[in-house]
Amino acid sequence: MKRILPQSFTKVRATSALSTQASWQKRHLAWLTAAVFLPLSLMVTAYGVVEYGPSEPVNVRQVTQQLITPTIVSAQSDTPFWREEIIQTGDGLGKLFNKLSINDNQAWEFIRTDPSAKVLYELSAGRLIRAQTTPDGRLLQMSYLNKAGNLIQVIRDGEQLRTQIAPAVTEKYTQQKSGTISSSFYGATDAIGLPDEVAQQLIEAFEQKVDFHNSLKAGDHFSVIYEVEKSGGEDLRTGRILAAQFTNNGQKHEIYWFAGAGIEGAYFDQNGETSGQSFLSSPVKFSRISSGFSRRFHPVLFKWKSHKGVDYAAPTGTPIYSAADGVVTRVTRDAGYGKFIEIKHGDQYSTLYAHLSAFAKGLKPGQSIKKGEVIGAVGRTGRVTGPHLHYEFKVKGTQVNPLTLKLPNSKPLNATQLAQFKPQMLRTKQQLALLSKVELAKLD
Ligand SMILES: [Zn+2]
């Protein structure tokens, strides 16, 4: 049980998508795109020609004079309006049409009936939706980011409307946050608005050093630097933790992400020793174990059977992550396992994921996979009574209990790698120290 978070750590938050956008809540912008006549810079050229007698040279003087007229601003009646709204939980397109002052039966019919418009219903609470209309509410264009990070647009071409989906143009930023635990870990991460995905990564990064179940104390604190992808000023998704520090019971632990010199990317402590494990503690997030690795009475076969895996109860559709880097060996189905996936991790280890409702698009044997990559979704295919993930961990082909197994670590950095790692690490360490100092000063 040690590697698995107790239920008090599980969290379901319908509004979590809103948390990163809290500051946007108050925004409700409507602005007028005024038609501006460019300053008229009139170039007037006058030729002063004076005629003299034939013997006199002709003196031609060119006079250039600039006439500046004042800027004329005109709010014409057909000037389009831009409006934007934050999508709230429960908002449908009809409601958003109202909020965005779209008054356009043709657009409404298009959205309701056109097959290409189905994609428009992928509304994500917390995201911005923007619309451009004529002053009388005719829709000219509308756009927002969906959950997958694609830019969804409705565009008017003359009398026609069409939809368009394209990957959003994104930029990476780093974000830094620091927090102190008073009652619970998630209480502290919520208090500073740390996204759940980053909180989960923090646990995974430190769980070999910090027992999140039993050893957290009031006053424990952490600082974290992580990547955020933004699109058009909106936070699109959080990326990986680049560095973090966790002080538990007066003991400080640090991790640094390092890629380079033959390393694809992994966490190391300040001495270049590996930090964390090369396997995820569980292949699904925020779920509970419904059946451990043991002998048990099989509810469908009605007989005692050894249970050679761990079951995670989770709703159908919950994403399943590859427990480690590896190569996919099986993507198939049978009567017992239903739809299942097997992944090989190096020479000794493999993992199996069963009863899936779906495989990740295009997943096939022979394919390389990264730790934490989505491989499928929880379901109830095969011999099951309800939706769950059956997870098996094999060492040299034999199932072992992943909850008690001492999982393998990767190698520490060698001299060449250390030479690259050290200067980066020292810079980041300073940044973490500063963050931590600011956090502690708040408590004084
Ligand atoms: Zn099972």
Image (cartoon, grey):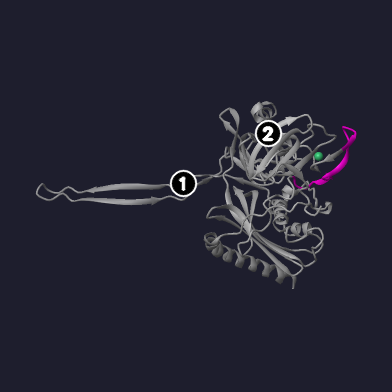
Q: Helix, strand, or loop for circle 1?
A: loop
298 is within the stretch colored magenta: yes
Q: Is residue 6 left or right of residue 280?
A: right
Image location of residue 187, percent across then percent down:
79, 58
Quarter-wise, where is residue 123 in the image? top right
Q: Which residue is mark 2?
A: 331
Q: Amino acid at mark 2?
A: Val
Q: Which residues are magenta?
A: 284-304
Outermost residue, bottom side: 444
Of the image marks 2 and 1, the number of the one nearer the N terminus? 1
Q: CA distance from mark 2 to mark 1?
A: 62 Å
Vertical comparison of 80 with 182: above or below: above
Image location of residue 383, percent across then percent down:
82, 32
Front in this rendered view, residue 321 or 78: 321
User: How many numbered badges does the structure rendering display?
Assistant: 2
How would you rate the neighbour count of disc 2 (Cα within 10 Å): few for under 14, some for 14-19, many for 20 or more?
some
Whether residue 36 is visible here, answered yes or no, is yes
Quadrant, the C terminus: bottom right
Q: Is residue 386 left or right of residue 70?
A: right
Front in this rendered view, residue 25 or 204: 204
Front in this rendered view, residue 47 or 348: 348
Vertical comparison of 9 with 91: above or below: below
Q: Helix, strand, or loop for circle 2?
A: strand
| Residue beneath the point at 78% across and 40% down | 390
* Residue 38: image tag: 1
Q: Is residue 196 left or right of residue 327?
A: right
137 is within the stretch colored magenta: no
